[in-house]
Image (tube, coloured by chain):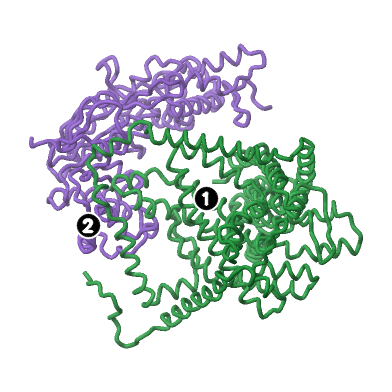
Amino acid sequence: MRVFVPISVGGWARLFSRWDILAVLLILGFLVFLATASRNLFQPLAELQRSPPSLDPSNLPEYAARTTLRMLVAMALSLLFTFTYATLAAKNKMAERILVPLLDILQSVPILGFISVTVVFFMALAPGKVLGAEFAAIFAIFTSQAWNMAFSFYQSLRTVPTELIEASRNFRLSPWMNFWRVDVPFAMPQLIWNMMMSMSGSWFFVVASEAISVGNTTVTLPGVGSYIALAIQQQNLVAVGWAIGTMLIVILIYDQVLFRPLVAWADRFRFEQEPGIIAPRSWVLDILRRSRIIDRLTRPVALLWRKSFRPKKADVAPPAEQAQRRGPSRITFQLGLIAIALGAILLWQIGSFAIEGITPADVGTTLLLGFATFIRVAVLIALASVIWVPIGVWVGTRPHAALLVQPIAQFLAAFPANVLFPIAVSGIVAWKLNPNIWLSPLMVLGTQWYILFNVIAGAVAIPAELRAVGANFRVGGWLWWRRIALPAVLPYYVTGAITASGGSWNASIVAEVASWGDEHLQADGLGAYIAQQTDAGDFHRIVLGIAVMSLYVVIINRVFWRPLYLYAERKFRLG
Amino acid sequence: MSTALLEIHDLQQSFPKADGGEHLVLDGINLALAQGQIVGLLGRTGSGKSTLLRLIAGLTEPSSGTITYLGQPVLAPAPGIAMVFQGFALFPWLTVLENVQLGLEALGLPEAEIRKRALAAIDLIGLDGYESAYPRELSGGMRQRVGFARALVVHPNILLMDEPFSALDVLTAETLRTDFLELWGEGKLPIKGVLLVTHNIEEAVLMCDRILLFSTNPGHIIREITVDLRQPRNRLDPQFRDLVENIYVAMTARASATPQVGAVTERTTGATIDTMLPRVSANLLSGLVEALAAAPYNGKADLPVLGDELHMEVDDLFPVAESLQMLRLAEVEGGDIKLTDTGKQFAELSIDDRKKLFQRQLLSSVPLAAHIRRVLQERANHVAPKSRFFDELEDHMSSEAAEGTLRAVTAWGRYAEAFAYDDDSGTFSLENPS
């Protein structure tokens, strides 16, 4: 047994290995990034107005750092939310009944709606300071990241294999230890995948969250998003190009430095134990793992961490105490009552707030506008499906093409399509097209890729034997599509289409009103309605618009997507 | 006999049913585990032996009765009772060493002690050199060794084993059993008693000092058998063979001969609509009839011999035998299986004629099949939803059992062309697609 020495004592030959040097560079780089990005947080707001963002490309590194920091802070908050909310939902039957439907609804609330409603509140938290606006922006980004992560974690917790749960209980792991040793590791691969999706998705809202404007309150935080907003305002295409370039670089960097190492590291948490699957690798992770300095630095932390697993005296329990778990506890019952009471008060509050100054005609209008947006989303998803499903199947059944196209499709899904809106707007203006029709494609510009890469994944997953059967019996043409390709990719397609549909509703708030300098275009729809009311600062109608949109999304999910998903899973999931 | 490690009195376990009633899975269980004993719980799937093990482990609570471990009631997972799982239950994200250390960490031992004991256990169980491997890098046998090391390292008084060898191939399982028995015999294992759940008769005779035979519906102990043979035991030893034969006989005893005994006959003589049906494919039934009809059996076989020859364990063989008996194609008695005249006739027929004979047997001796057919004939459109029969069955059994029984009768009905079933709409009908 080795005795633990808190400094590196082995290997006198070299003071530092090259891995150490690289690791130190990585860490210093991260610290510099933090410092740059958080420098101006405590400035008074007035300072922002004195030095407004400029389109000088030399500002972009700092802007990018600040934007990224916001996204990372939001990601940390989302993780915290995920670990608490989803765990409570999965472990407590009573809480589950309230929390899961609540999450379902939160997911359907348009994210830009959150910004409009909450900005004033956050500004009031740190009056006159930049920090308040930062809170608002971070909260908006948080709302675009947290829900699907929480859902994924909740579902993972519900599917931990029974034998593992029994082993954990048999060896009497404390709840804290069980959470970190069993629950989190089991959920990790799926959670990281969802974190990547969330990070991608949140770019879309960065643009909206950094240039906040509700009624008379207008705050512009320095960042890539506000840079783009300014470029659009000044009709500066070159600046838009610079911003896009910066985003590409940022996405590339955090993919390499953050997500790839995470994916490679999380590979050990895969539950399926078949050997032979090629493990993902990451050079950053290799450096960190091989560096002795990192090893020495992290070891005490790891030790402390493990110490926290030790049972406290109270946990090493007399059995009698644990036996109290029998029967429904009074406490949960009372908690339930409190929750119901709280819900009733909230409902009353919202109701009375919303009803004030809202006529039935308003409700009718929003429902009608919602229907217009619904038609747009439906038609566009259908169109995108007709285009991308055949292409996805074609690509997916050719391994080389799939290797090439799959990452591109995923990148395009990460790319904030709203950056491209100005180009579309100038086109529509130039050719005098009907905005009601031609603004619509913008809604699926960013979301159609989910359909493509899910279908590719589905086509790749068609077992070679099934394809061989098709070839053997010379099944070709329409028959091949009908009997082999389409059924095989259906479950994957539905997953992609659900994401795409939800994203399109969200995007409608930006897509139905678009501007390029002085040119403002507008389509008739619920998204445009919410955007308008946000500009006007009419909170009653913002809430009404958001409520109606959530209603549409929830109903469509329940009535259409959920049954379709269950059907596809039951009937067409292979293996 | 020295003091008992574990005592169980009048244990009963039931699960709520959909209609509000109770489904009894264990009834009237009494047993004691003394120091230095390996006690086997032997029975078919569904006899509640795994449930019993989980009750002892404190993973669930009994409906009534008591379990006492060293004089203390077991109400939650107790220190000193460790379990080895059928599916290994290793944490794939922990290395071999970390998996083994898990239970010690939960005990809150000092770091140095944890390491020392974990390495000692790994050494003992023959896992040296695999400390830093992840479970997915190991073969099944090595994985189960980790399972053993993880359980032994906490120095439990009682080791619970839930079919620990059944997920392994024959050779690996045998090596692991021998190694375990050797360590146990030499007193190198830090445990005082073992409870082994198994459905493998030879495994039970090979390892156990006492065997408790379980019967199904509800699970209860039908017989206790003491194994006096010296270790190491030889499977070819006539005394060993006799014991195996006796257990087969006990498990297939005719209900008329020894009332309330017998896993096979109890449920098969005079089947009613609510009789649970085993899920055995028609192909397997035909296959066994053919094997029995041919030489060297010529219509009659000794079940242990047949099981050995066909590489079928009790859990595979009994449901087939039971189904043949239910369909009156064979008779099971005293550890033997014998084809009836109808069975012999069945073996000789062509595929189409077999189906006709099967239909006759099905409708005359499986009341549920006859019931479904009758309902379909009475209805004008000859269609009935599955839920109609499901609800009926659920009044008498758990919903899983109802689901399983309906699937079994559907499979037989399809083979016999007695009725058709459409899974998309969930309906039975008389029509076959033409």
Q: Colour of chain B?
A: purple
Instruction: Look at the picture and state if A313 lies above or below B251.
Output: below
Cα–Cα span, label 1 and label 2: 34 Å
Query: Chain under label 1?
Result: A
What element does badge 2 sit on?
A: loop
- Say left or right for B346 vs B9: right
- The outermost residue toward the left is B1
Residue B272 place in picture, x, y as percent = 43, 15
Q: Residue B69 location, x and y as percent?
A: 18, 37
In-front residue for pair A455/A124: A124
| Residue type at numbered disc 2 | Leu
Disc 2: host chain? B
Which class describes the residues within 10 Å of circle 1: few (<14), some (14-19), or many (20+)? many
Q: Are marks 1 and 2 in contact (CB under 8 Å)?
A: no
Crowding around mark 2 (Cα neighbors within 10 Å: few <14, some 14 to 19, many 20+) is some
Residue B68 to residue A73: above or below: above
Screen quadrant of the C terminus of chain B: top right
Helix, strand or loop under label 1 = helix
Q: Which residue is mark 1?
A: A150
| Colour representing chain A | green
At 49% from the left and 50% from the top, the residue drawn is A153
Give me the disc on residue B109.
Answer: 2
